[in-house]
Image: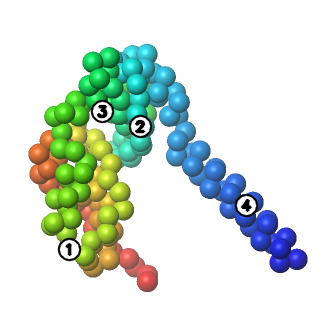
């Protein structure tokens, strides 16, 4: 009886995980096809998702000259305003993390991802600060200057 419950729990857990993961990557194949057809990108290295005021697929890839580009592809609307960034012009993710680690004692990084808010291209840092608050911090992708920050406190422990 216990073995059957464990098996059912494992099967359901696997199904739930796959379902959630599929929703997170939903549309990636369509975006990849569009980017390869309509931009100078010939090779895609990574696709990520950003939800801000608008939702974007963030595509990182290379063109024929082997230049790495970052493309913000909006998910809403028929007219798509694609924003392209040459990654040689931005502060690398690792440098932003190193600066953040020096300035945020007792913090735990959750993730860092590119973001686009009101035509500002940013890095979004998600982390827990020393007071156990969940923080979303946005810094310029070009110079690392602070754009905005949100701190969320837990209501229940």
Helix, strand or loop at mark 3: strand
Label 1 – label 4 distance at C-alpha: 40 Å
Reading the chain from its start, which is encountered first: label 2 or label 3? 2
Helix, strand or loop at mark 4: helix
Label 3 – label 1 distance at C-alpha: 31 Å
Label 2 – label 4 distance at C-alpha: 29 Å
Instruction: Give the residue number, with chain letter if any, for mark 1.
Output: 105
Instruction: Give the residue number, with chain letter if any, for mark 3.
Output: 70
Give me the residue at 33% from left, 48% from top: 113
Left or right of 115 in this view: 100: left
x then y, percent, for residue 50: 38, 45
Q: Is residue 41 above or below residue 54?
A: above
Helix, strand or loop at mark 2: strand
Left or right of 62 in this view: 1: right
Instruction: Give the residue number, with chain letter if any, for mark 4.
Output: 12
Instruction: Give the residue number, with chain letter if any, for mark 2.
Output: 46
């Amino acid at each position: 009886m216990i073995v059957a419950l464990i098996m059912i729990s494992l099967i359901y857990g696997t199904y739930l995980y796959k379902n959630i993961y599929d929703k997170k990557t939903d549309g990636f194949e369509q975006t990849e096809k569009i980017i390869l057809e309509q931009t100078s990108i010939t090779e895609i290295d990574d696709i990520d998702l950003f939800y801000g005021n608008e939702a974007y697929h963030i595509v990182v890839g290379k063109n024929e000259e082997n230049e790495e580009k970052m493309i913000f592809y909006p998910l809403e609307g028929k007219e798509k305003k694609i924003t392209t960034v040459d990654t040689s012009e931005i502060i690398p993710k690792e440098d932003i993390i190193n600066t953040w680690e020096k300035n945020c004692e007792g913090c735990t990084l959750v993730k860092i991802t590119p973001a686009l808010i009101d035509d500002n291209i940013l890095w979004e840092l998600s982390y827990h600060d020393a007071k156990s608050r969940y923080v979303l911090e946005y810094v310029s992708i070009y110079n690392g200057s602070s754009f905005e920050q949100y701190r969320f406190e837990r209501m229940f422990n």
